[in-house]
Image (cartoon, rainbow, N blue to C red):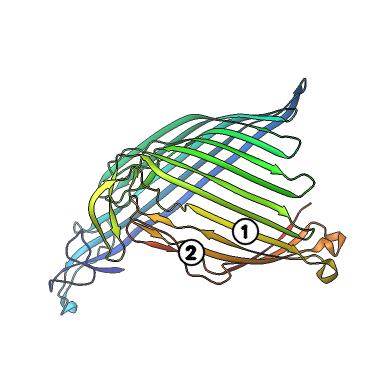
Amino acid sequence: MKKTVQNSKDSYNDGSVDSATPNLQYYRPQTRNYSSESIAFDTRLDGKFKIGNVKNTWVVGSDFRHYDLNQNNIISSTDAIIDLYNPQATQFTPCLNIASSSGCHVRGYDGTWSYFQEGVYFQDQIKWKRLSVILGGRQDWFNDQSHSYNYRTGQHDTSYSQSKFTWRAGLIYNFDFGLSPYFSYATSFTPQDTTNWQGRLIAPLQGKQMEAGLKYKVPNKDILITASAFHIDEDHYLISDLIHTGYSEDAGRVKSQGFEVSANANITRNLRVLASYSYTDARFAKSNLTSRKYNPYIGEFYGAAISQEGKSVPQTPRNMFSVFFDYDLPKAWARGFGINWGLRYVGFNYAGNVESFKAPAYILFDVGAHYDFGEVLPALRGLKAQLAMSNLTNKYYITTCGAGGTCYIGQGRRVYGNLTYNW
């Protein structure tokens, strides 16, 4: 039994009272049940064929996902006038079940929710001499149904259906001196079964991506260097509704562009290094939404509402950099043992949809060790153990912040290990 002091039936008090006889409600859960069932599978066929000097590697397949949720959460309550200075003097009959008394108030809901998505896809990798081309496509069907009864708002049934064909294509040419330029174009489709505060279904997220880059394998060296630039447009990008709490809204079109560079190299027989840097500029490219800026120091929104168009997408770092080293100890010292270490840098990101303030950048250090049992006992070839520690210094840092000043603390020091066997 939970007791909550209220000033009225529909508004909770924060702990202070202005009257000696406020309303007191007793809550009693009547039913609270949840059950779910999910089915998912992915099947595919692949093969190869050759036409003259052109080699083809094809794949066709289908994936299926189905999810059912049954839930009910019904609570009954009753009102009683109580004198806070003499609570023992108050007498009332608790609401023991929904139909026990006309004075019982029923809240909650019960219903079912069903999610279904089916996709069929194909891909053909075409190779002619040093040129490789990939062509692929996918058709998706999505359906969402719900049947629920809310004891405040009544019956509510919904049914949403969406479908879309998406495709992708890419090509890469491998020069004999190690350079491989490439280009790719792809479209995407992600169902969104979310409604806005008016009950309107938000359209599926649809995207277009272009990427061009270079891969360079240094001749006679175990060194691979890659560089790429990308441009992504996404329509019907989903963000939180800052006015109607608990709802989402369509932010319109978001444009993301940037570049990435990475290097993977064996510096010596025992020492390897992996380094990468990325720059991402993600902005609301076309939006009719407006927001006010938020000052986290005073805990209030301020100024007039301004357009979100052209502003940075919140919680998206612009700069990220990492470098990791892995060193196998000399066999004469510790056969099969290795150590690794490195750092991760994550740049600042904005909070709010109109760049209200920044969550600061941070750097984390990681270390680890690994052991290959097969180096000592040939019978255990393929068995490896690894121990790692992330955030070595147990640094306190903020990952992202919401528009209302709520910030999220990052993961502290964590130690974990695993044992794997490959054959």
Q: Looking at the picture, tell me which residue is in the foreground, 400 or 78.
A: 400
Residue at point 67% right, 47% down? 225
Q: To which quarter of the image does residue 31 belong?
A: bottom left
Residue at point 14% right, 75% down? 83
SS of the residue at dot 2?
loop
Q: To which quarter of the image does residue 215 belong?
A: top right
Answer above or below: position of 256 versus 350: above
Of the residues shown, which amino acid type is indicated by label 2? Gly
Q: Looking at the picture, tell me which residue is in the foreground, 247 or 57.
A: 57
**Residue identified by numbered label 2:** 410
Image label count: 2
Answer above or below: position of 7 versus 190: below
Q: To which quarter of the image does residue 15 belong?
A: bottom left
How far apart are labels 1 and 2 at the CA level?
A: 20 Å
**Residue identified by numbered label 1:** 323
Check disc 2: other Cα within 10 Å, few if <14, some if 14-19, many if 20+: some
Mark closer to the observer (1, 2): 1
Whole-percent x, y for residue 58 in the image = 68, 29
Whole-percent x, y for residue 297 in the image = 30, 66
SS of the residue at dot 1?
strand
Answer above or below: position of 165 versus 301: above
Of the residues shown, which amino acid type is indicated by label 1? Val
Q: Is residue 321 left or right of residue 90?
A: right
Whole-percent x, y for residue 108 in the image = 31, 53
Task: Check the picture and name the quadrant holding the N terminus.
Answer: bottom left
Whole-percent x, y for residue 216 in the image = 69, 43
Check disc 1: other Cα within 10 Å, few if <14, some if 14-19, many if 20+: some
Q: Is residue 214 left or right of residue 296?
A: right
